[in-house]
Image: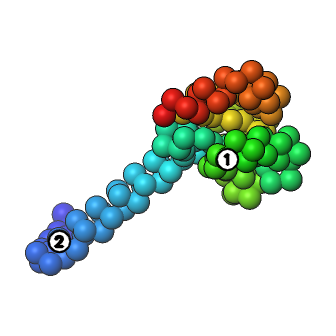
């Protein structure tokens, strides 16, 4: 029978190993919480007005203009300028049934796209929703 020598590790080596293991676990947890789904939920829940947009889209520009006329500053997520933009669009598809842009949320409530936002502004519903902080 072959006998293998047993190597005893010092406390410093054990501490270093535990530190590295902890850092690895924290990194993995951070990556999991920064998933596109977690990002979308966090933005919707933490921002008063959110527009998921593409920088070149005329309908998105229209949505931004509506808020500008109301002297409101939305939090805009430009999907075409993000590496995870396509994944975010699929999260929106799961969340609201659409992956088109813009998708607008006010106080956590899904308003819809450009036409929905415009109709809400014209009817006064958007202003009422904005008034309830």
Q: x%, y% of residue 7?
A: 16, 74
Circle 2 Cα neighbour tier, 10 Å, few/some/many (<14 / 14–19 / ≥20)? few
SS category of the residue bearing label 1? loop
Above or below: residue 14 compared with residue 82: below
SS category of the residue bearing label 2? helix
- Quickly name the residue at label 2: 15
Upstream in sequence: badge 1 or badge 2: 2
Q: Which of the 4 image quadrants contains residue 89?
A: top right
Above or below: residue 20 compared with residue 25: below
**Can residue 54 be seen from the camera position used here?**
yes
Left or right: residue 129 compared with residue 121 = left
Please report the residue visible at 59 percent of the width from the left and 27 percent of the height from the top: 129
Please report the residue visible at 49 percent of the width from the left and 38 percent of the height from the top: 45
Please report the residue visible at 73 percent of the width from the left and 47 percent of the height from the top: 68
Left or right: residue 25 compared with residue 116 = left
- Quickly name the residue at label 1: 71
Q: x%, y% of residue 29?
A: 40, 51
């Amino acid at each position: 029978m072959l006998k293998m020598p047993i190597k005893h590790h010092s406390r410093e080596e054990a501490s270093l190993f535990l530190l590295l293991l902890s850092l690895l676990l924290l990194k993995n947890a951070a990556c999991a919480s920064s998933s596109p789904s977690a990002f979308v939920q966090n933005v919707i829940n933490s921002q008063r007005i959110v527009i998921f947009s593409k920088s070149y889209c005329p309908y998105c520009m229209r949505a931004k203009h509506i808020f500008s006329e109301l002297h409101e500053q939305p939090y805009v997520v430009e999907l075409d300028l993000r590496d995870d933009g396509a994944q975010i669009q699929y999260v929106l598809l799961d969340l609201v049934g659409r992956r088109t842009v813009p998708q607008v949320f006010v106080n956590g409530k899904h308003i819809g796209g450009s036409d929905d936002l415009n109709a809400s502004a014209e009817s006064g519903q958007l202003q009422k929703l904005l008034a309830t902080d």
